[in-house]
């Protein structure tokens, strides 16, 4: 007898997802609702995935409210109680069984369709081609959809290039930028100022009108007092200038002790916040508190997982990414503003900006690049100046470039 369904594995996946929130992320990285053979299991899985994206607690009541049915709570309870183990390795193993069974069913259906076609006298060469295509694309999320496009087709998908602009001259959707500066230069304050002003429709450096955006700050270092001290004062000032003030566009996710993007729980927590807020811009810092280097590892190896997770998130949710990083230790003369640790942080971003202190005036910072900008349209100021009201303001040597906000609004 052909075994194309494993009820125990399907129930174990769902039970583990009820036991541990991070198990939801582990499962959805491997399977999707359509991979479940039992329609009821598919509905429960989809409900939990939706709840996770909404940032809602996943329990019997919340799942039942989405799925419905008189016996759903008792069924969920049995699944949770009968789950052998909910550890990371176990959840991955259960999900892999569900996925493999789904692939086996697809293969079986394709072979049955080819067999039926032969019996009906269909063209055997066409049947062979169809079967080969089905088998070689098995497991692809878009098995019947060609994803490659011509340049004309790609251009046609962009209805309005301005929709991709997050902050004019600084960030577009899916762009990655790293700011590097020595300790004590106020990198966190700069990211906070960029986040607050842009969320209320003001350019961080020109203070002119721009399209308001949704921003998530992932603060991995500062106590709440430090955030509030500068943040609340700036928000009060910004409120007087904003044409469309809405404080809900800015959210702050604090983990003062740092996170480790190599741990499933920390990845799940970050995905939950991003899925809930759906930001246009995510500001994270400092980089050195995003992941931990294990014994015997190089900085390059330990950085890979963090970069992979950030790349997956920014492409999945379509946000721009702005990171704060410490500068490498210099030897002689002016300190080199390159990212500390792995050299991969130097080559990874689309734009890398180094902030150099002014020896004669501590309120001024020279802006330079530690790697050439990959993309056109980047026009950061040549200098960042501390400002009592705005926290920071920008100065361009040749004046504010065209397109850096609406000229009618400037401080």
Image (spheres, rainbow, N blue to C red):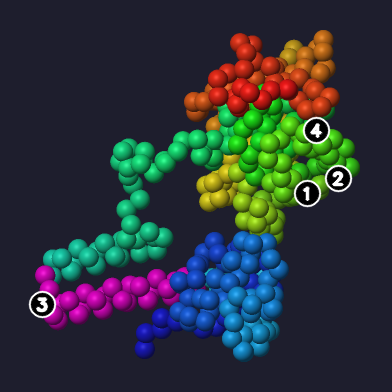
Q: Is residue 151 visible?
A: yes
Looking at marks 4 and 1 on the same chain, the residue that comes earlier in the sequence is marked by: 4
The region drawn magenta spans: 96-123
| 3D distance between C-alphas at marks 4 and 1 | 23 Å
CB under 8 Å between discs 1 and 2: yes
Report which residue position mark 3 lands on: 121
Residue 334, compared with residue 285, is above or below; it is above
Residue 207, compared with residue 7, is above or below; it is above
Looking at marks 3 and 2 on the same chain, the residue that comes earlier in the sequence is marked by: 3
Q: Nearer the viewer, mark 4 or mark 3?
A: 4
Residue 48 location, quadrant: bottom right
| 3D distance between C-alphas at marks 1 and 2 | 8 Å
Q: Is residue 294 visible?
A: no
135 left or right of 79 in image? left
Residue 282 x %, y %: 65, 43
10 left or right of 411 in image? left
Residue 254's disc number: 1
Q: Residue at x 17, y 76 (%)?
A: 117
Residue 224's disc number: 2
| 3D distance between C-alphas at marks 3 and 1 | 65 Å
- Estimate how packed mark 1 is, as few (under 14), some (14 to 19) or many (20 or more) residues with alpha carbons within 10 Å: some
Residue 243 location, quadrant: top right
CB under 8 Å between discs 4 and 3: no
Quadrant into which the N terminus falls: bottom left
């Amino acid at each position: 007898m052909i075994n194309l369904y494993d009820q125990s594995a399907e129930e174990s996946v769902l039970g583990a997802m009820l036991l541990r929130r991070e198990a939801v992320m582990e499962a959805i990285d491997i399977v999707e609702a359509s991979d479940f053979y039992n329609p009821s299991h598919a509905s429960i899985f989809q409900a939990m995935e939706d709840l996770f994206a909404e940032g809602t607690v996943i329990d019997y009541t919340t799942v039942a409210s989405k799925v419905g049915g008189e016996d759903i709570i008792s069924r969920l309870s049995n699944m949770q109680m009968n789950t052998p183990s909910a550890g990371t390795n176990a959840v991955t193993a259960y999900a892999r069984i569900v996925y493999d069974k789904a692939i086996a069913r697809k293969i079986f259906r394709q072979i049955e369709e080819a067999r039926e076609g032969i019996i009906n006298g269909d063209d055997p060469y066409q049947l062979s081609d169809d079967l080969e295509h089905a088998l070689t694309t098995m497991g692809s999320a878009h098995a019947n959809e060609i994803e490659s496009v011509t340049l004309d087709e790609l251009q046609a998908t962009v209805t309005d290039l301005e929709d991709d602009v997050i902050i004019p001259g600084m960030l577009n959707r899916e762009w990655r930028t790293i700011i590097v500066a020595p300790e004590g230069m106020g990198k966190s304050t700069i990211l906070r100022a960029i986040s607050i002003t842009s969320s209320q429709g003001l350019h961080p450096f020109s203070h002119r009108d721009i399209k308001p955006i949704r921003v998530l700050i992932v603060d991995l270092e500062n106590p709440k007092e430090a955030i509030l001290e500068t943040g609340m004062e700036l928000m009060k000032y910004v409120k007087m200038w904003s044409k469309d003030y809405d404080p809900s566009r800015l959210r702050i996710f604090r983990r003062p002790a740092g996170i480790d993007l190599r741990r499933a729980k920390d990845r799940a927590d970050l995905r939950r916040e991003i899925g809930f807020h759906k930001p246009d811009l995510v500001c994270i810092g400092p980089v050195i508190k995003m992941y931990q280097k294990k014994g015997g590892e190089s900085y390059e190896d330990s950085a890979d997982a963090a970069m992979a997770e950030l790349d997956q998130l920014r492409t999945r949710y379509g946000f721009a990414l702005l990171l704060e990083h410490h500068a490498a230790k210099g030897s002689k003369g002016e300190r080199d503003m390159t990212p500390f640790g792995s050299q991969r942080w130097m080559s990874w971003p689309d734009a890398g900006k180094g902030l150099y202190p002014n020896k004669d005036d501590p309120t001024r910072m020279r802006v330079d690049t530690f790697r050439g900008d990959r993309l056109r349209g980047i026009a950061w100021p040549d200098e960042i100046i501390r400002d009592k009201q705005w926290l920071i303001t920008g100065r361009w040597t040749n004046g504010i470039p065209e397109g850096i906000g609406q000229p009618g609004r400037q401080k």
